[in-house]
Image (cartoon, rainbow, N blue to C red):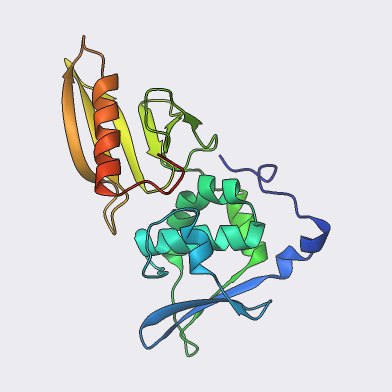
Amino acid sequence: MASAESVPVASPAHSHRDAVEYVGFRVDGQAVVLNLSEHRRLSLNRSLDLVNHSPSGFEWGYSGSGPAQLACALLLDYYDDEQFAREHYIAFRNQVVSQLECDGAAACWHLTGEKIDAAMATLTDDVVALSDGGRPSPTLPGNWRTVSCPDRRVFQRADRDHYIVLGDGSDEWLVVLCSQGDRAYPAPLAHRTVAEEADPERVIRELAEASNDLIEPTEGEH
C-alpha cells in the first residue's frame, strides 16, 4: 500500500511541487504530454531508461503499454525518484492514467501535482510493482528479482514488463511467464507444469532465460 509517508519528501528545490501541472493532447494523432508549469515536453527517453513498455510513445485512457510508459514518466518527472517510479507506476497507471481522457472543447487532459500526491496516498500496488521493489536471486539471471506476494511466488524482470508467477495446483506446480501486454492483463507468454514433489526452481530459471532470449537484457543486467 502506498501511503502518504511512502511518497518521497520534496527537497527545498521542489517545495512548490504541488503547483506542477501536466497536460496531454494529440498533434496529428501523436500523443504529446507537457509539464505545463515548466513549459517543456515530458521526456520519453528518461522513462525508457527505467522501464521499456512503449518505445513508440505515450498513451492514456486504458491499461496498456503506452499508458504504463506515461505513468512511469509522470512519476519520474514529478518525484524525481527512480525507485519510487519503478515500484508504483503500474498501480498509478491502473487507477489514474487509464482514466485520463481528452474531452471538451480543448481536447486535452490536465493532471496537477496535488492530484498525483492525493492518488499516491491511496493507491494499492499491483503484483508487478510491489512496494519492496524485489530483491536479487542467486538462482536467477541478474536482471530478475524475487518479489513478495501473500498468496503466490512472483519473480519480476527489472528491465522489462515480464514476470513469472508460480501457482500451487492440486497435484502439480503451474509456472507461467507473463507480459503486461497491451490491453490484456496479464498476457501469458509461456508456461510449464512441474510435479508437486519436484523442485520448480529449474523451470523458473528456464522461463527467465526464455524471457531474456525474447528481449535482450539492458546492458549491465546480464
Q: Position of residue 143 (x, y in %)?
A: 42, 38
**Tally of marks:** 0
Residue in the foreground of this view, choosing between 153 and 54: 54
Residue in the foreground of this view, choosing between 124 and 160: 160
* 132 on left or right of 188: right
Specify the quadrant that holds the N terminus: top right
Say if 193 sits above or below 183 in the image: above
Residue drawn at 83 percent across, 58 percent down: 12
Residue drawn at 37 percent across, 23 percent down: 139
Q: Position of residue 121 (x, y in %)?
A: 62, 49
Residue drawn at 39 percent across, 68 percent down: 61
Q: Position of residue 127 (x, y in %)?
A: 41, 39
- In the displayed orientation, state which residue is furthest to the right: 12
Residue 195, by quadrant, is top left
Residue drawn at 69 percent across, 49 percent down: 8
Residue 66, by quadrant, is bottom left
Say if 104 sits above or below 200 in the image: below
* 213 on left or right of 129: left
Residue in the foreground of this view, choosing between 177 and 139: 139
Judge whether residue 96 can be spotted in this image: no
Say if 21 sits above or below 122 in the image: below
Residue in the foreground of this view, choosing between 2 and 159: 159
Q: Position of residue 217 (x, y in %)?
A: 37, 46
Specify the quadrant that holds the C terminus: top left
Judge whether residue 131 can be spotted in this image: yes
